[in-house]
Image (spheres, grey):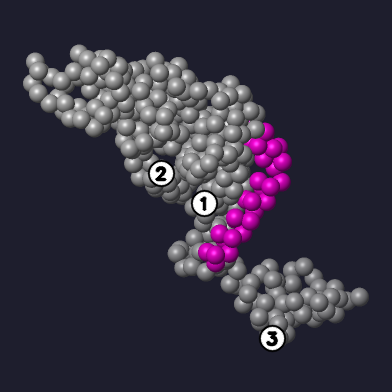
Amino acid sequence: MGEYIPRNTINTNSTALARIAKVQAPWVHAIGPTRTSVGTPESRGAGALCASNDEELKRLFEGAGTLGPRMEMKGYAASFQVQAWMLLQRTRNTYWRNVNYSFSRYAAMTMLGLILGSLFFQIEYDNRTGLQSRLGMVSIIASFLGLVNSQNGVPQMFSERAPFIREQASHMYRRFLFSSAAVTVEIPYVITTTFWFCFIVCSLTEVSSPFSEDGYGFLQFWGYIVVYTYLMLTIGFLFAFLAPTVEVAIVLVSTFFNMWNTTSGFTLPAPDIPVFWMFMYHANPLRVILDILASVAFYCDTKSDDCTYIYEASQADLCHGVEANGTIISGSDSTCTLIPRCQLITIRDETFPECAIPMDSCDCTYVKDQNNIFAWDILHETYDFSYSMVLNHGMILLAVSIAIRNLGALVLQNVDHNKR
């Protein structure tokens, strides 16, 4: 089919080789040269399509940048937008096709929701035991969601480390886009799993129930849990980027979370925490979310007119300055006007807490075995919960999650576990 060309003359007979290739396979000439072709463009009969292909191959080979002599340092063939979009699509498909991973997350949330909901089913908190039980349930919710979600992403991220190292060797995309795609794809999972979990638990326990007259409390409860869960997920990814193995990453996550759990102010009250460890109390995401969730679940405006205390006081307790049936009692301590025993007296302070009985028109729950003090007032005084700070604390959690996400990208950019 063609003439024989000696092996030692192939470099000096490029014209003949190109002519033979054209006869044997015309499509070779139409497509254009590759980088391993021999001869010159003139000897290959460079046409318009050939020249266009040659320029395109050169552009793809050399990349878009001019950062150094090495090919992998010369930039990326694809634009920043293309890299980000393709990584996001690939990561989403990886999660979507991993049925076991997705099913286990939803199954775990369902089972835990049913367990907690049945254990704390409609517990009344008009006594000290019930109040402590409800607050303990809120603490369990924060602890479980934080620990599970911080550990969820660790094995998933390590399963992607080998492809990531291989693709970085080929200089396919920027490192920080890999971490950004991973934490972004997790957002729909966090939103849906936490909603399903909160719906089950809040419905069964009637803590910020979605079926209450004011459903805003449930939306608040769920929304702040989403922000907190996302924060704990980014913390898990940070340790996954930082640790050399999955075992080390899980140990780091567990260690830090147990320290946060101990210094959250629930297990060990803040005044009892040693001074040396107070920094863990102030920089504790579990403490912040516990403050938020407890405030949303238990807050009641105890200072409203409907919740004015009515005191059932004895004659010896009465003194001047107290309003009784529209009459101001006046006089010195020795000549104080006396009212018959058990007269109902309306006042705005807590002069007689031992006989305080909230009015029937007040919707706030009071604790009967704690001198009828409102449940919210007890929690506010004991744990320093503040409903007015809920929004500020939520914004702090969101800002910290964004900062840790960026910190994880920085760690991935500079820490290389593939070095020997």
**Type of amino acid at the residue the image marks with label 2:** Gly
Residue beneath label 3, please?
A: 48
Residue of label 1: 180
Query: Quadrant of the image for the N terminus?
Result: bottom right
List x then y, in percent, for residue 338.
18, 18
Residue 7 locus on image (x, y percent): 77, 68
Residue 394, label in figure: 2
Which of labels 1 and 3 is toward the front?
1
* Circle 2: element type: helix
Return the disc, 2 or 3, that comes first in the chain's sequence: 3
Would residue 327 be found to the left or right of residue 96 on screen?
Answer: left
Amino acid type, residue under disc 1 in the picture? Ser
- Residue at image point 75% right, 76% down: 31
Q: Nearer the viewer, mark 2 or mark 3?
A: 2
Residues 419 and 277: in front is 277
* Relative to 397, 248 lies left or right: right
Q: Secondary structure at mark 3?
A: helix
Circle 3: residue type: Ala
Q: Residue at 62% of width from left, 47% of height from top? A: 163
Residue lying at 49% horizontally and 68% vertically, measured from the top left: 65
Closest to the observer: 298 or 144?
Answer: 298
What SS does tag 1 mark? Answer: helix
Q: Work out whether residue 334 or residue 297 is closer to the camera in this orientation and state it.
A: 334
- Specify start and end residues of the magenta stretch as a single range: 79-108
Mark closest to the chain's N terminus, 1 or 2:
1
Q: Is residue 280 above or below residue 22?
A: above
